[in-house]
Image: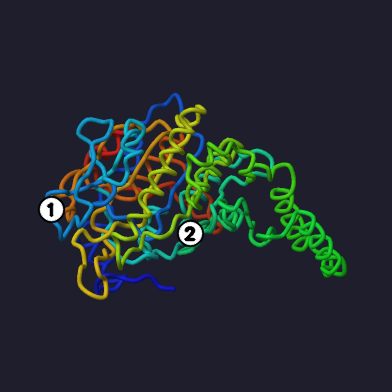
Amino acid sequence: MRGKSTGATTRRGFLQAGLRAGLAFPFIPVRNMFAAMPQKTFAKAVIQIWMWGGPSHLDTFDPKPDAGNDYCGPLNAPIPTAVAGMRIGQLLPLLAKRAGDFSLVRSMTHGINAHETASYVVQTGRTPGDGQVYPAVGAVVAFKKASRASGLIPPYIALTKPLGRFSEAGFLGSRYKPFATGGDPNANVFAAEGIVTEGISRERQERRRGLLAQLDTLDKKQPSPLFDAMAAGREQAYELILGEPGKVFDLSLENDAVRDRYGRNTFGQSCLAARRLIEQGAVYVSINYPGWDTHKQHFNLMSRKLPEFDTGLSALLEDLAQRGLLAATIVWCGGEFGRTPKIQWEAPWNGGRGHYGKAFSTFLAGGGFRGGQIVGATDARGEEIEKDPVYPTDLIAAIYGRLGFDAADTVPHPQGLNIPLVPARETSAGPTPLNALT
């Protein structure tokens, strides 16, 4: 399905205009992005909460209460946080208490309003058009840190579905695709691409496994390395879900009070599963969290969505901190863009917000990033970047820096090309604003 755009501008036309206007990330050499990185300790893992569809910055981390009803609607009373001078959306009271743990980047920008292109740019830090399909951050981290993963725990895991708008592994290949669990962790069911199905007992699943082995005899009649690899992968998947390693997915092993604290819903239990996976050696866990593409009845949806987000994310931060994991785990929350600051009250939107890539917010916690900070600013209506623009490449470079990746590193390409970890910059505009977080 193609992504919708809020205007008539074509994707190619926008990118061409962006290049002329300087929106294609025209600043900061790579080494400047890593310049302020401490050299002693590095993060070991990342939990990415991918807010698919694009959350509204005005309703979450960049409220504008004085902009009026056409911009705020009923969410016009932001709340103070534990950090002096930092206010966030009124439906995020639990996160407000933990503001010392996280920082907010209020000046994210790329100007792209189409889902696919914006997702690709935010996840890879690259603009399309040079004939390459670059790997997403999760695939790069899996490539760089796969040796840390223990046993059968895949280094890169998606709860519960892949991001789906592009090839996350890019030219790194299928080995670095995310292992998508499928299922619904709130029901304590993980499907592992169809290997386990909701409502089927373990015993029945084992019988089905045996029957499949009896029927699938082509590999025995025509042995080949390909069939051997497929069989090995299938057995590893079964072992991961049904064997001892699969216990990492068994949320029933957690105390009920802990599960309740995260929220008994798919997102809350995904956050709990992410914490368990990081404990067991996963290096990158992406929670694919849809529902933010709120073209219609935005505020009705936010009245349900934001409390769920507040509960799950605050519990994750608290749990990671209590277990001594937050300092070594980056928590990154955001979507492919924001929502239009001006509300579309007219039919058929009835109080909706459209796509908005010109200005949006990102949340960062843990992994050595300083908490309680605000980077950048938008204008009084949240429509324009007013201070310290931050582009996806800057954010990705900062995350790589906190993971200890060398700015001069490259990633392997099947054609032997020399691909830098992050794209080089031709001009310098001084240190990136994100240096304030390291």
Q: Horizontally, is 105 left or right of 68 in the view?
A: right
Q: How is the image coloured?
A: rainbow
Q: Percent from the top left, x then y, of residue 104?
A: 29, 41
Residue 148 appears anywhere in the view:
no
Q: Quadrant of residue 367?
A: top left
Q: Tell me the residue at 41%/43% (across/down).
A: 311
Q: Nearer the viewer, residue 427 or 86?
A: 86
At mark 2, the secondary structure is: loop
Q: Is residue 375 above or below residue 209?
A: above
Q: Quadrant of residue 121?
A: bottom left
Q: Amino acid at mark 2?
A: Leu
Residue underneath mark 1: 67
Dots 2 and 1: beta carbons under 8 Å? no
At mark 1, the secondary structure is: helix
Q: Is residue 437 above or below residue 362?
A: above
Characterize the local packing of mark 1: few (<14), some (14-19) or many (20 or more) Cα atoms within 10 angstroms. some
**Tag shown at residue 238:** none
Q: Tell me the residue at 38%/54% (across/down).
A: 305
Q: Percent from the top left, x then y, of residue 377?
A: 19, 44
Between label 2 and label 1, give the one nearer the viewer: 1
Q: Horizontally, is 82 left or right of 38 in the view?
A: left
Q: Quadrant of residue 354?
A: bottom left
Q: Nearer the viewer, residue 368 or 96?
A: 96
Q: Amino acid at mark 1?
A: Ala
User: Which quadrant, please, contains the C terminus?
Assistant: top left
**Tag shown at residue 163:** 2
Marks 2 and 1 sit apart, C-alpha to C-alpha, by 34 Å
